[in-house]
Image (cartoon, coloured by chain):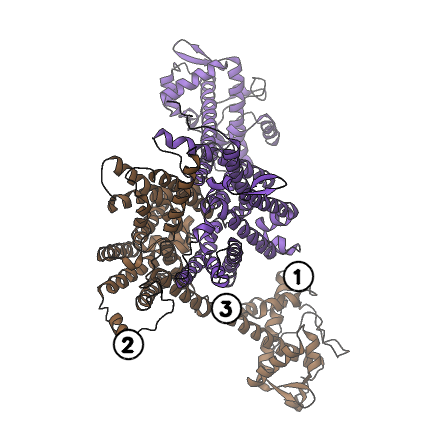
Chain colours: A purple, B brown
C-alpha cells in the first residue's frame, strides 16, 4: 500500500491552505513571542471564549448577521478582555492567570445570557462568525487586480504585515518592556502603553484569524511555536525568526498529515487546523528533546560525556598512582572496577576507549600507561596535589576535607590554571599528605623529592567517583 | 474530487465541536417569549422549599460542586495555576475520542459514559503530567506549558473527532455532549457523584492541608524539609482532575473553569490566612452556585451555568472592592490614612522648627499666645499645596493639636507642642544615627530621616536613644545636627553640628 496515495498536490487548493495556515501562524506567532515572555500565553484561549458578548451585542444592536459588525464587536470585547485582565491584575493585586480566568468566564457567561435573550429572533450561530474552517479557504475568493485571491489570505496577510510593522517599529520598546518593565518605565517609555498596544493587537490578530482558520489554530500558534523557539535560542530576534519557521513547518506538516494519515486507517482526511496544532506540538516535543542548548536528550548526553571523561581521568590517575608506589597487583578490569567503585563493563569500555587513543596498553593480565597516558595522568595528579596544597595552605580548609575538593577540582583544571596554582603556592615539592607533586616534564617538582615519604593511607583508598 | 466535501465535513465537525465547547444549558421553556417574567409567589415558595425534583437535584449538585471546586481552587490559585482546570478540561477531548474509537472497534454499541470518562481522564492526566514535565525540564513557565498542552491536546481531539465523524457508528455529533454537559439536565446520579467527589476532595484537602499549604507558599522550603514535592504536586493535580472531570461532565467547560478560579480569587481579598481562605473559597463557591442555580430555576430564560458564573463574578467584584484584607477600598483607605499621618507629622514638625528658629519657644512666660506660625511659612517648608495644608490644619484643629490664629496662621497648643517635640526628637535621633552610624553627610540626612520617621515605633525610638545615649543631650528634644532652613527667618537655628 502506498502511504502517500492520498497526495494529489494542487497549488490552488493545498498551496492556499498551507499559505493561509502559515500566515495565521506567523501573524499570531510574532505576537505570541511577547505573550510567552510576558507569561500571558493563555490570552488567546481567553479571548476565544470571551468575545461571545461582543458578537451578541453586535447582533442585538444592528439586528444583522453581517460579519463585519460581528468582527467589530468581537475586537472591541477582545480588547476589553485584555484591559480588564490587566486592570484586575494591577488594581486587585491578583495573579495574571486568575484575573484572566475571572474575566473570560464572566464575559462568556454574559454573552450566553444575551444570546438566549436574542435567540427567538433569529438562529444566531456564533460559530459561523467565529470558527471558520481553514479547508474552505480556496472557495471564497476576492478579485484583486484580476487575480482570484482568497479573502482569508488577504486578511491574514494584512494582519501579519501589521504585526510585523508593529514589532519592527517598537522592537526596542517591546523587548525592554517584556524583560524589564521597571527599567523601561524609568527610561521614559511607558511599559503600560506598550502592554495595552500589544494586547490590542493580539485581540485584533486573534479575532481576524478565528474567523478564517478557527480558534484552535490561533491558540496553538500563539503559544507553541514561540515556546519551541524559546528553547532554542536566547536572542529575541532569533526567537522571532524561528517562530515564523516553526509556524510554516507546522502548517505544511499539519496539512499533509491531515490528508495522509487518516487513509492509513481507512478514513478520509481530518481537520487540518487540528492537525496543524498537533504538528506544532510535535515540533515542540522535538525541540524539547533534541534542542542543542536546552534539549533534554542533549543535556543528558552532555552529562554522560562529562561523567565518562571524569571516570577516564580517574582511571589513568589511578594507574599512575599504582606505578608511583610500585604496586604490582595486576590491574585487570575487575580489579580497577573494584577500586574505582565502577561497574565492570563500564571500566572495560573505558579501557578499550583509552587504548584506542593510545593512553593505556595491555600488559599481561592488566593494563599499564603508555608514555602519552602517563603525561596526561601526571598533569591530573599534579593538579590534584597542587589543589590539595593550595586548599590547605591558602584557602584554609581542614586537612580531612581537602582530598574530596581536590578530587572534584582536578577535572576542571587546565594547563594554565595548573601553572598559576603552582606559582601561587611557590611550586611545592610535596603535597600535604607527603606525596611528591610531579613536575611538568615527568620529573618530580624540585630536586630532593626522593625523600618523599610513603603514601599516607588516604591516597591508597579507592578513589571516589568524580562529581 | 472528494476533497472539498471533506473540507465541508471537517468544517461541520469543527462547528459542532466548538459549539459543544460552549456547553451551557439553555433552560428555555418557550422560544418565543423574550421577556423575563417575574415569578409569582407560589413559584418562589416552590423554589425555596425545593419541591421540584429537578430543581432539588440541580441546586444540590451545583452547590456541592461549587464547594469542592472552591476548596481545590484556593490551592491552585496560590500555586499560580489558576487556569490548570482550563488546560485539563481541553486535554480530555482526545481521550474521549480515542475511547469512543476503541469501543466502537471492539464492537460496543453506543457511548458508554464510564469508558468515555475514563479515556478523558487518562489524557487529562497525561496533559497535566506533560505540563509538570515541561515546567520541570525546560525554562518555560507554567502559563506557556498550559497553553501548549491545551492547544495541542485539543487540536488532537479535533482531528480525532474529524475521523470519528466518518465512522459508520460515529454519531459523534452528540459525543461531546457527554463531556460538555448541561447543568439544568443534571440527574440525581450526577449530584451523587459530585457529592462523593466533593467530599473526597475536601477530605484530602483537610488531610494534606499542611503539606499543600507548604508547597503553595514555599516549594523550596518544602523540598528542604524533605517533603515529596512532586508527589504533593501530583496530589493537588489529582484533586483538580477529580473535581474537573466530575464537574465537566455535569456543568460544562467554562463553568468549571469559573468555579475553580473565581471563588478562590474572591476569597483571597478577605483574608491573609490560608485556612480562612480555603473555607471561605468553598463557601463562596457554594453560595454562588446556590444563588445562580436558584435564579435560573425561577427565571425560566436564564441559563443556569451562565447565571452561576455571573453570580460568582458579582461576588468577586464585591470582594475586590470591599475585601477586608486586600480589597481595593481597604488599600486605598490605608494609603489615605498614611498620607494623613505623614502630613500631620510634617505640620507639627514644621511648626516646631519654625518656633525653635524664631526663638519663640524660649519665651516661656508668653505661653501659648506666642506660638504662632504663619501659614505661608509652613507652605513653603514642604511641597504641599495650600489646599492640602489647609485640610491638614483642619484635621489637626479637630485633634486639638493646633488652634487657628487671627493672623492667618496656626498656634501650637500645649498638647500640640508635646506631640511636636516628640516628632522632632524622633526625626533628629534618626538623623544623628544616620550621621554617626551610617556615614551619611549631614546635608542629606534630613531627607533620609524624613522617609523613615513616620514609621518608627516606640521600641525603635527607645533603641535609638540607647544607642545614641552618649551623643544626645538628655533634654526632651535633641538638637538638630544640621542647619534648619526655615523660610522667613534670617537667623539660622542654633545649630550644634554633629554631637561629639
Quarter occupied by the N terminus of chain A: top left
Is there any visible trace of residue A246 in the rendered image? no
- Chain hosting mark 1: B
Q: Earlier in the sequence, mark 3 or mark 2?
A: 2
Above or below for A318 versus B252:
above
- Chain hosting mark 2: B
- Chain hosting mark 3: B
Indicate which label's residue lies in the foreground, 1 or 2. Answer: 2
Is there any visible trace of residue B160 in the rendered image? yes
Above or below for B96 versus A92:
above
Q: CA distance from mark 1 to mark 2?
A: 76 Å
Label 1: which residue?
Answer: B440
Indicate which label's residue lies in the foreground, 3 or 2. Answer: 2
Q: Earlier in the sequence, mark 3 or mark 1?
A: 3
Instruction: Name the spot of residue B305 as percent of width and height, x first.
Output: 35, 60
Quadrant of the rendered image containing residue A118? bottom left
Instruction: Name the spot of residue B436 as percent of width and height, x first.
Output: 64, 63
Q: CA distance from mark 3 to mark 2?
A: 43 Å
**Which label is found at residue B41?**
2
Label 3: which residue?
Answer: B331
Q: Secondary structure at mark 3?
A: helix
Do discs 1 and 2 belong to a common subunit? yes
Q: Secondary structure at mark 1?
A: loop
Tags 1 and 2 touching, CB below 8 Å = no
Q: Residue at x 69, y 65 (%)?
A: B442
Point out the residue furthest to the top here.
A364
Amino acid at each position: 500500500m502506498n502511504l502517500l496515495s492520498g497526495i494529489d498536490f494542487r497549488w490552488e487548493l493545498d498551496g492556499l491552505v498551507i499559505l493561509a495556515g502559515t500566515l495565521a501562524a506567523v501573524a499570531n506567532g510574532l505576537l505570541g513571542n511577547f505573550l510567552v515572555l510576558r507569561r500571558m500565553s493563555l490570552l488567546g484561549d481567553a479571548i476565544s471564549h470571551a468575545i461571545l458578548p461582543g458578537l451578541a451585542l453586535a447582533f442585538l444592536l444592528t439586528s444583522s448577521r453581517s460579519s463585519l459588525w460581528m468582527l467589530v464587536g468581537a475586537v472591541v470585547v477582545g480588547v476589553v478582555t485584555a484591559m480588564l485582565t490587566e486592570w484586575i491584575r494591577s488594581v486587585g493585586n491578583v495573579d495574571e492567570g486568575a484575573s484572566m480566568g475571572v474575566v473570560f468566564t464572566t464575559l462568556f457567561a454574559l454573552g450566553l445570557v444575551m444570546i438566549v435573550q436574542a435567540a427567538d429572533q433569529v438562529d444566531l450561530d456564533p460559530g459561523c462568525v467565529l470558527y471558520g474552517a481553514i479547508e474552505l479557504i480556496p472557495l471564497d475568493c476576492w478579485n484583486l487586480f484580476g487575480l482570484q485571491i482568497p479573502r482569508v489570505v488577504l486578511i491574514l496577510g494584512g494582519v501579519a504585515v501589521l504585526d510585523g510593522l508593529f514589532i519592527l517599529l517598537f522592537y526596542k520598546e517591546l523587548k525592554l518592556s517584556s524583560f524589564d518593565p521597571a527599567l523601561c518605565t524609568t527610561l521614559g517609555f511607558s511599559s503600560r502603553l506598550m502592554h495595552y498596544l500589544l494586547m490590542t493587537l493580539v485581540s485584533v490578530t486573534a479575532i481576524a484569524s478565528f474567523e478564517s482558520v478557527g480558534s484552535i489554530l490561533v491558540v496553538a500558534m500563539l503559544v507553541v511555536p514561540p515556546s519551541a523557539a524559546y528553547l532554542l535560542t536566547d536572542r529575541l530576534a532569533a526567537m522571532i525568526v524561528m517562530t515564523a519557521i516553526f509556524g510554516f513547518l507546522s502548517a505544511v506538516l499539519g496539512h499533509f498529515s491531515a490528508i495522509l494519515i487518516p487513509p492509513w486507517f481507512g478514513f478520509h482526511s481530518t481537520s487540518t487546523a487540528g492537525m496543524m496544532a498537533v504538528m506544532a506540538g510535535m515540533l515542540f516535543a522535538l525541540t524539547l528533546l533534541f534542542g542543542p542548548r536546552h534539549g533534554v536528550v542533549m543535556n543528558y548526553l552532555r552529562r554522560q560525556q562529562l561523567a565518562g571523561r571524569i571516570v577516564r581521568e580517574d582511571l589513568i590517575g589511578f594507574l599512575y598512582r599504582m606505578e608511583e608506589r610500585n604496586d604490582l597487583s595486576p590491574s585487570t578490569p575487575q580489579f580497577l572496577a573494584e577500586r574505582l567503585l565502577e561497574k565492570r563493563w563500564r571500566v572495560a569500555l573505558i579501557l578499550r576507549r583509552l587504548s584506542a587513543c593510545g593512553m593505556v596498553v595491555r600488559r599481561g593480565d592488566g593494563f599499564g600507561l603508555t608514555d602519552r597516558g602517563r603525561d596526561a595522568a601526571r598533569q591530573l595528579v599534579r593538579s590534584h596535589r597542587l589543589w590539595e596544597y593550595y586548599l590547605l595552605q591558602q584557602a584554609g580548609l581542614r586537612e580531612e576535607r581537602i582530598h574530596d575538593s581536590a578530587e572534584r577540582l582536578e577535572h576542571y583544571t587546565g594547563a594554565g590554571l595548573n601553572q598559576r596554582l603552582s606559582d601561587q603556592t611557590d611550586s611545592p615539592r610535596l603535597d600535604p599528605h607527603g606525596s611528591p607533586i610531579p613536575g611538568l616534564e615527568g620529573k618530580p617538582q624540585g630536586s630532593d623529592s626522593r625523600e618523599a615519604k610513603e603514601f599516607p593511607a588516604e591516597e591508597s583508598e579507592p578513589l571516589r567517583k568524580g562529581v | 474530487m472528494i476533497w472539498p466535501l471533506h473540507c465541508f465535513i471537517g468544517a461541520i465537525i469543527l462547528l459542532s465541536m466548538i459549539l459543544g465547547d460552549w456547553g451551557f444549558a439553555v433552560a428555555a421553556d418557550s422560544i418565543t417569549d423574550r421577556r423575563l417574567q417575574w415569578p409569582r409567589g407560589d413559584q418562589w415558595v416552590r423554589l425555596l422549599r425545593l419541591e421540584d425534583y429537578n430543581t432539588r437535584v440541580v441546586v444540590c449538585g451545583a452547590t456541592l460542586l461549587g464547594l469542592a471546586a472552591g476548596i481545590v481552587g484556593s490551592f491552585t490559585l496560590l500555586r499560580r495555576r489558576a487556569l490548570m482546570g482550563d488546560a485539563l478540561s481541553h486535554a480530555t477531548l482526545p481521550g474521549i475520542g480515542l475511547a469512543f474509537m476503541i469501543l466502537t472497534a471492539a464492537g460496543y454499541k453506543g457511548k458508554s459514559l464510564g469508558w468515555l470518562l475514563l479515556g478523558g481522564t487518562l489524557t487529562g492526566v497525561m496533559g497535566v503530567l506533560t505540563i509538570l514535565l515541561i515546567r520541570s525540564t525546560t525554562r518555560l513557565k507554567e502559563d506557556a506549558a498550559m497553553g501548549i498542552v491545551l492547544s495541542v491536546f485539543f487540536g488532537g481531539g479535533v482531528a480525532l473527532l474529524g475521523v470519528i465523524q466518518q465512522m459508520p457508528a460515529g454519531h459523534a455529533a452528540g459525543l461531546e455532549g457527554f463531556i460538555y454537559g448541561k447543568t439544568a439536565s443534571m440527574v440525581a446520579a450526577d449530584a451523587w457523584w459530585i457529592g462523593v467527589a466533593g467530599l473526597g476532595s475536601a477530605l484530602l484537602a483537610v488531610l494534606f492541608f499542611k503539606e499543600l499549604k507548604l508547597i503553595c507558599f514555599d516549594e523550596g522550603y518544602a523540598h528542604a524539609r524533605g517533603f515529596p514535592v512532586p508527589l504533593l504536586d501530583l496530589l493537588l493535580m489529582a484533586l483538580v482532575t477529580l473535581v474537573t472531570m466530575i464537574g465537566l461532565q455535569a456543568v460544562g467547560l467554562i463553568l468549571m473553569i469559573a468555579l475553580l478560579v473565581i471563588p478562590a480569587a474572591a476569597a483571597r481579598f478577605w483574608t491573609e490566612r490560608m485556612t480562612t481562605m480555603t473555607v471561605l473559597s468553598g463557601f463562596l463557591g457554594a453560595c454562588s452556585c446556590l444563588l445562580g442555580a436558584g435564579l435560573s430555576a425561577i427565571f425560566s430564560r436564564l441559563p443556569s451555568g451562565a447565571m452561576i458564573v455571573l453570580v460568582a463574578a458579582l461576588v468577586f467584584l464585591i470582594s475586590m472592592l470591599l475585601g477586608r484584607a486586600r480589597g481595593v477600598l481597604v488599600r486605598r483607605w490605608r494609603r489615605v490614612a498614611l498620607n494623613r499621618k505623614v502630613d500631620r507629622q510634617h505640620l507639627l514638625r514644621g511648626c516646631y522648627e519654625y518656633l525653635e528658629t524664631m526663638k519663640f519657644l524660649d519665651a516661656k512666660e508668653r505661653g501659648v499666645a506666642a506660638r504662632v506660625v504663619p501659614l505661608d511659612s509652613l507652605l513653603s517648608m514642604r511641597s504641599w499645596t495650600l489646599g492640602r495644608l489647609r485640610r491638614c490644619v483642619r484635621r489637626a484643629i479637630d485633634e486639638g493639636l493646633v488652634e487657628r490664629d487671627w493672623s492667618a496662621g496656626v498656634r501650637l497648643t500645649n498638647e500640640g507642642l508635646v506631640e511636636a517635640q516628640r516628632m522632632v526628637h524622633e526625626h533628629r535621633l534618626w538623623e544623628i544615627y544616620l550621621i554617626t552610624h551610617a556615614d551619611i553627610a549631614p546635608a542629606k540626612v534630613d531627607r533620609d530621616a524624613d522617609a523613615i520617621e513616620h514609621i518608627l515605633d516606640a521600641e525603635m525610638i527607645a533603641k535609638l536613644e540607647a544607642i545614641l545615649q552618649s551623643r544626645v543631650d538628655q533634654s526632651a528634644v535633641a538638637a538638630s545636627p544640621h542647619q534648619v532652613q526655615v523660610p522667613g527667618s534670617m537667623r539660622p537655628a542654633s545649630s550644634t553640628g554633629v554631637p561629639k
